[in-house]
Image: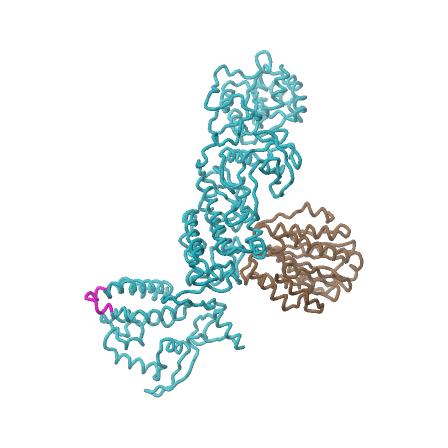
Amino acid sequence: MKNDLLDEIFKNYKVFIDTCSLLSEFCEIDNFFYQIIPLISKYKNKLIIPLKVFEELEKHTKNPKLAEKSRKVLDVLRTVSDYIEIRGEKNDTFADNLFQTVFTKFRLQYNLALITQDKNLSLDVLNLNNTNSVKSHYKIKVFKFDRNGQFIEFNKNGNVSYNSNGYKKNSNANQKSNVYDKNKAAKNNRCLRLCSKVTSLKDDRIYITEIPSENMEVRTRNGTIMLQRKISSGGEGTIYETNTKYVAKIYKKELVTLRKIKKIKLIISQKFECQGICFPIDELTNKYGEFVGYLMPRASGVELQKSLFIKPLFLKRFPNWKKIDTVNLSLTILEKIKYLHDRNIIMGDINPANILVVSPHEVYFVDTDSYQIEDYPCPVGTVNYTAPEIQRKHFNDFLRTKGNENFAIATLLFMIMLPGKPPYAQQGGEDPISNILNMNFSYPLGESSNKKTPEGPWRFIWSHLTYKIKQAFYETFNKGGLYSQENKRLGVDKWIALFSIYSYLLKKNKLQATDPASGELFPTSFKNFVDEEGKVHKREFSRIVDTRICERCQKEFNITEKMYRSYQAKGENLPTICPVCSIYETRKCETCGQMFNITKGEYEYFIKHNLKIPKNCQICRKQKKSISRTTIGSTSTKKNGCFITTATCAEYGKPDNCYELTMFRKFRDEWLSKQPDGLKLIEEYYRTAPTIVDLINKQNNKEDIYRLINDKFLVACLHFIEKCEYEKCKRLYIEMMEYLYHEKEKWSN
Amino acid sequence: MILSKKSKLNIHIDGIFGGLMLEEFDILRNEDLVNNPTPRVAVCLCLDTSGSMEGEPIDELNKGVELFFESIKEDETALYAAEIAIITFGDRGVNCIRDFASLTVEPDVPRLQASGSTPMGEAVNLALDKLQVRKDDYKNNGVDYYQPWLVLMSDGSPNGDYSELERAKERTSKLIASKKLSVFSIGIGTSADMGELSLFSLPKRSALKLQGLKFREFFEWLSKSVARTSQSTPGENVKLDTDGIKGWGEL
């Protein structure tokens, strides 16, 4: 046997042996081990025997022809058990197939040697050297025992082609070529595969002899470098400065897995380049040639988690920031995510500890080795940034979709806009997982909210966001929202568009013109709003602090923050009667002489509309009204309300006390007027409706218009009222008003 | 910062936490509650300050608590997440000498004095009441929070009211079983009633015995565990540094 050949392969290769060689008549197993045991000790490199080979040997002990030889081999293997490594699992397939699989897996990390007598297997395994899709600077060699019992390299005899594109036969780890050379780089904008099935590569620990630390050398593909000062230490490993401009991440011993190694190599092979995304650029090996980590550009700045997300730290680190700075920061972050998404890279574990902020225009993404790339999953994640559909799943067992990721993006943006506040944190909430699963979003859009918005500055900050941004969050986080489903969520491009507009509006002071606080990070009041005449109003404390049952009408009514404050200020107990029912004064009817009450609700209504407080009781008033009504839409109907409905009903020849009108009035008085926005709507209605009715009546096709109103809106509204779906009725009613308002232009011409 | 206000108010009478008047303390901690978005981890230290703790044990305990405060202050995430309350039993019966608040609200370390008996049951009940109130505060204000922690330390046997003791044990085991509370029962010295202490922390874990007077090691471990928790998201499983227990606990 050629000792130096064996020496060479045990020095530089992981050595595997096949069943057929062990059983070969040309192999003297004792002799072979005498030769290799010193080498195994010297290079701490055990001979690897797949479990399958072992099983085959055991099987052969029952085969009369091979029984004797296989028993002998097994005996020898047992005695040399310290020098062999049995690897693999019970369910591995055929040994032949197995070698191909194993060699495919490992050829990117090690020089591999196979000892086999099987010519076809030899050719197949050697052919892996020529795989074009993934290039390796490691080599595969095949050996066998020849007819003289000599251990020789398998002679390919021209059977194997080495001249396929670009493969360098003599390439080795010390080659001086510039690995960072961009000309050779894979196209920078290459799009990776978007996979749906996790790689079959095992994520089991790989044995690493030694983990380098401070002041130790590590090898890159480009030569040896030195680890210097420790920068930080985390769950996965340690980051060191090096004697290059790059920093090194060295994994913890137990965390190096085959899957990780292959994934890092794949990322490195892509030669990504995006300022601020700290991609691995070269792998690092220890003096035994084992993978221990990677080299990457250095990040700077401070974690979002330890700056923006905690108010005192935010104010300390970025004392001069305004709202526009957080908006621009969002854009900077979104652009980096876009770079990744455009290449089908899913960040996976988007979280505020992985994003470092220097300024609104300079951020660094770290822990990029966890990104999901092709069929390598992102093995980590945090609850807050995990979409409801993938909560409680094991991150290492599936591949995330862009839809899943878009949830994380929305959450990140929300938590930058409302610095540090998770979107689902709410009053009376459950734990964050349940809150996310419930998709019960507590911030209002218009009047729709679950009234559980967290205490503190959050509702103010929310109120100052632009409507479009609020809507985007609302529709994403609210159950049943337009963008609430995995495949419907807004992607990075949409968010960039929204935030660009936001940034523009702030830059041009458009938002600050209505309310200067809109430009601040932590406004202390709700956003002012502008009415139709362009007048700026302060928003009142409309938040509901309590809901009670009215002692009179037995219906629920709300105690708003404003009411609460005023009662407290007066030192009074909170009311037990709803505002509508509570009596303002008692009068004597001028017509019938009966006493009648005027409730606060009525009083406020009369005052609001500049009406006189009635001198007659309701019954007498009604009678008078029906007498005085002559023309539809005339001022006399005003007291009765429901212009449009009344007009429509009149058009259809229905009386004032018809079923439809009674129902609509009931809806208006008993439900709508008690809604937070109800009085406002009713008021608006009284302002616009009379002119609309007048206009319609002047049209030649007024029958058609009333028919349209009836068919398109009123029928459906009535239907909703009958089914007690008041909210739907309200929405349709608003829609009708908007429609009429729009048509008004046409009619007035 | 809001903390500067308190330095002038250094009166120590009942109803005052550290250097802050109760009212002011409440205002500040409620302000913190609504302004600080960080999910909270409430830690209640329920400490035996009975007569038997006098001398070296109480000194070491004081140093331990001080170290605990200092380590939490050093970790930015933990500082804004941890809300610490201290309940003592022994000296003047059962006292809540510090209600739940971040160390940014009340950074002072209280001095503990040893005297009196060991009304452990009463103390744990008060701790549980306080925890419940604070949890409600979190809920009502829409603040996320982690499963709270109760640290019970004693060097003797409970000798308060028997029914209070039984009630406390029942309450803790219910909370532990429903994963609403983590309890660490720590025995100090040879007279600590490990059996009784264990009844507070079961079924999750038995009481642990402190090696000698390694309060400082214990509190260092505790602050690290709090810091680690504060870096996770509420509801996530956080692995306890069990190896670290070897630094202070007898196994």
The residue lying toward the viewer, choosing from A62 and A716, is A716
Say which colour chain A has.
cyan
Q: Is residue A443 magenta?
A: no
The location of residue B231, given as percent across then percent down, is 59, 50
Q: Is residue A414 left or right of residue A649?
A: right
Magenta stretch, overall SS? helix
Tell me what residue is drawn at x 47 percent, y 57 percent: A440
Q: Is residue A205 left or right of residue A747?
A: right
Tell me what residue is drawn at x 47 percent, y 27 percent: A132
Q: Is residue A706 magenta?
A: yes
Q: Quadrant of residue A24?
A: top right
Tell me what residue is drawn at x 77 percent, y 52 percent: B213
Q: Is residue A525 above or below residue A321?
A: below
Q: Is residue A24 left or right of residue A684?
A: right
The residue lying toward the viewer, choosing from B210 and A628, is A628
The location of residue A464, given as percent across then percent down, is 46, 60
Say which colour chain B has.
brown
Q: Is residue B221 left or right of residue A673?
A: right
The location of residue A3, given as percent across then percent down, is 64, 16
